[in-house]
Amino acid sequence: MKPLDLATARQLIDFSGGNDEMKPLGELQLRGAVALQNMLVDPDVGMGYLADEVGMGKTYIALGVVAMMRYFNPGFRVLYLCPSRNVQEKWFDRELPAFTKTNVLTRNFKIRTPQGDPGTPAISCANVDELIHAATTGYYGDVFVRMSSFSMGMGEEDDELERRYNALKQRVPAALLPRTRPDKEGIKQAYAEALNYLLPTFDLIVIDEAHNLKHNFESSARNLALSRILGFKNEHDKHYQPRVKRALLLSATPFDLNPQHLYNQLNLVGKGHLMPPEDQWWERDTLREAMSRFMVRRLNMLNIQGVEKTRNMYRREWRKGERAEISFATDEHKLVTALVQKKVGDMLDRQSGSPAFQLGLLASFESYAQTSRSGPVEFDGEPPPDGKRDAKDRHLIGLIRDSYVDQGFGQSLPHPKMDEVSRALAQHAFYQARKQLVFVRRVKSVSELKQKLDDEYDDWLRAHIKGVLEGRREAVEYLEDVI
């Protein structure tokens, strides 16, 4: 496969979809797609990293790259690795059909049928079982799967290990597995070996939100298993067959402050050598030059009075200092937070013998809105894999919250961050009539924030009515009785 020029690409793809207003963005997307395609076909590179800012159409650019490469190789096979179920469904159910119908110009039947549908058979796999079935029973040019499918959480108990090993034996041919059950690490390695053996070879893997793979093999069993399965991680006593020829990674945040996170993502797909030596990672020009070989990064520009400005030019962001930090406003905040931390620490200590935990996987990380009747906590908008990755502290937070409400202290537990945000929102919305836009990490936080804003509104309305009724003592007393 050879490098592509813009003139040829314009005959294959119209990123604007015929919409004149989208032509500037469409041209930017086309240039990005061509640059990535040429990186992928370069034998000295063999990968691309699309790091455009949010809102610039990374999904469509990736689909454009696939369409262009499939035009010259009709048998082109692609594995799409998505971060979650809802993102996987978006790619398969919406983005791929819409892009093919609206943006693909060529009538090559392997890309687009006369009816405007995708011309290559595609399948979306909910788990590893479906992936194995799809890989061994038919041809699919586009295979969609999510990252959680490659996680294989298990305990240390013999019964649990035996159950996991028996389940693995049901999935793959017995000849691929040891005759006697190995230990925990051995089961995971056997799982990776078997899946590596069964998978076909893909011409390309597209990894959406690749920053989720930023951890090294020592700290992420999933990343280690995934690298083994794809055939990139070879060990002294094991040799895995390469199952992917090229890799296209997508993320608006390839790394934040530590280049090690970028290296880990590249290393997972066998491209760690494209980074400069580790002692040069902090040399800005050296790192930038190395990344220019495999990365496309553009900023979203906003035209303000005829001047193009990037996000950092038209907004202010505080990551530290007085405006970024939230302090305990009341003794109640201190007491409740101390109680939650002590109870959660005690619970984790009893369960695992160590109070260490992953902060982001606790229900109390951002919200105290859980009740004893709440369902499992959802991470990244999808249920926990196998129903076992629920927040460990969900029931505990629910009991503390229910006890607080039952005692008549209020409708929700005091939470320093939530209370500060709701107070600031109320000040801007109710007293200054200014619209506000708030981003939260979890959907559950929306309901808690609304409840706290309802309380703030009640306080504002009470104060407003009292102000109107000033001097009318009987009316104010009646109002207090009603409230």
Image (tube, rainbow, N blue to C red):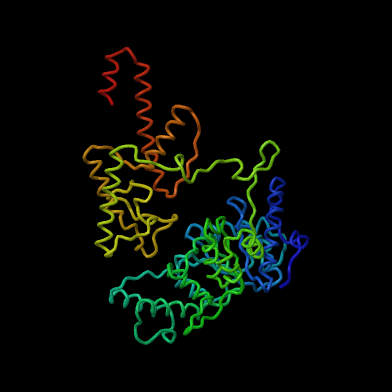
Q: Residue at x 43, y 78 (%)?
A: 189
Q: Position of residue 410 (x, y in %)?
A: 28, 37
For residue 273, side relative to residue 195 (left or right): right
Q: Residue at x 61, y 58 (%)?
A: 284
Q: Is residue 72 visible?
A: yes
Residue furthest toward the left? Answer: 407
For residue 409, side relative to residue 94 (left or right): left
Q: Position of residue 246 (x, y in %)?
A: 61, 71
For residue 403, side relative to residue 111 (left or right): left
Q: Position of residue 416 (x, y in %)?
A: 36, 42
Instruction: Say which quadrant the N terminus sits in.
Output: bottom right
Instruction: Say which quadrant the C terminus sits in.
Output: top left
> Residue 252 sits in which quadrant?
bottom right
Q: Residue at x 30, y 46 (%)?
A: 337
Q: Position of residue 142 (x, y in %)?
A: 58, 68
Looking at the image, how many numbered discs can be counted on the residues?
0
Q: Is residue 121 visible?
A: no
Q: 342 or 173: nearer the eye?
A: 342
In the image, is residue 476 above or below residue 53? above
